[in-house]
Image (cartoon, rainbow, N blue to C red):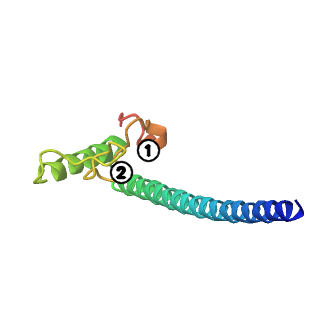
Amino acid sequence: RKQDLQGKQQLLLAQHRQAEQDRNYARKALDDACKKLLDIQAHRLQVCQDRHKAAQEALKLAKDCGLGPSVLKELCRFSAESSLRKSDHKDLKRSQSGVPLGQPSWQPSPGEGPAENGWALFGTGRD
């Protein structure tokens, strides 16, 4: 009887150690995934900040040249259209999010309004 209980106790201790080890592996995997997510978020923030800075500089250059915001907006739109026309692919491949891969980085993403994509900088188009 005593040996049976000792055997059960050893089995329970081994199961407990295995569960603890599995929990530690899962925690490490979760920590790694969180770190990757934080890295992605930091990169996206940096890209958005760079995009915003480029839009601010473009607007300043346009103003320095005496151009209104709608002219800059039209130039950006024309540039995007001409680059898409030059594309050999008639059907743009889509990423998993549904955004065309060949889309210029300054274009808004689906569902993105003017305030979120930087176009709010360019005013309403009335010069």
**Quarter occupied by residue 54:** bottom left
Circle on res. 106: 2
To which residue does mark 1 refer? Answer: 117
Question: Where residue 32 sits in the image (x, y, percent)?
Answer: 59, 64
- Mark toward the start of the polypeptide (2 vs 1): 2
In whole angstroms, how far apart are the C-alphas of marks 2 and 1? Answer: 8 Å
| Quadrant where the image shows the C terminus | top left
Q: Nearer the viewer, residue 38 or 127?
A: 38
State whether residue 59 is above or below residue 3. above
State whether residue 106 is above or below residue 21. above
Q: Nearer the viewer, residue 67 or 90?
A: 90
Residue 104 in sight in this render: yes
Disc 2: CA contacts within 10 A as few (<14), some (14-19) or many (>=20): some
Q: Residue furthest right?
A: 2
User: Which element is circle 1 on?
Assistant: helix
Please tell me which residue is depicted at 16% across the width and 50% down the height of the picture: 82
Question: Where residue 123 sits in the image (x, y, percent)?
Answer: 42, 38
